Image (cartoon, rainbow, N blue to C red):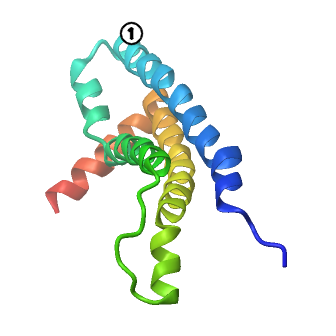
Amino acid sequence: MNYINPKIMVEICCIPLIIAVLALAFPILLQTTSRIDDKYRSTRLIRAFYREKVYIIFIASLICSLSSIIIWFANFPRLVNWGKGVNYLIENSSFILILGNSVFLVIILFQFVRLIKIYFDPLRLSEHLENKYDQEEE
């Protein structure tokens, strides 16, 4: 019976993907901050960018993904015996965690790039900020 080997999938797909997103994210983040400062000459916009929900979720997702890699390599043994189905979930919990984090990281990366594009376009930025502050007033 053919099945996906979790160890191979994590080592070939998930870990390189997380590392690539991390290697891509920080230079883009620094460039974005610098460009917002150069373009608008406003530290308030930089602070607003850092308070964006997508930005916060993206950074948290990066941290969770790196933590899941650490958990994967730690390879903690199963301490309890709760039956065949539960044992299978416990034994593969690090695989499930790293796979879920990888998928979520890719999804939030696209949202993060969308947010960066909004901040680079003055018209879209003004509309975004108006909508954001209108929603806060309601």
Element type at marker 1? helix
* Closer to us: 2 or 40: 2
Q: Amino acid at mark 1?
A: Asp
Q: Residue at x 48, y 27 (%)?
A: 120
* Closer to us: 89 or 135: 89
Q: Residue at x 74, y 66 (%)?
A: 4
Image position of 128 (left or right of 133): right
Where is residue 33? Give x, y as percent: 37, 20
* Closer to us: 67 or 80: 80
Image position of 88 (left or right of 38): right
Residue 125 position by quadrant = top left
Q: Quadrant of the C terminus?
A: bottom left
* Closer to us: 58 or 123: 58
Q: Vertically, is 23 above or below 34? A: below
Outermost residue toward the left in this view? 137
Where is residue 118? Give x, y as percent: 47, 36
Residue 1 position by quadrant = bottom right
Q: Vertically, is 37 above or below 60? A: above
Q: Residue at x 53, y 78 (%)?
A: 88
Where is residue 49? Give x, y as percent: 32, 33
What residue would you read off at disc 1? 38
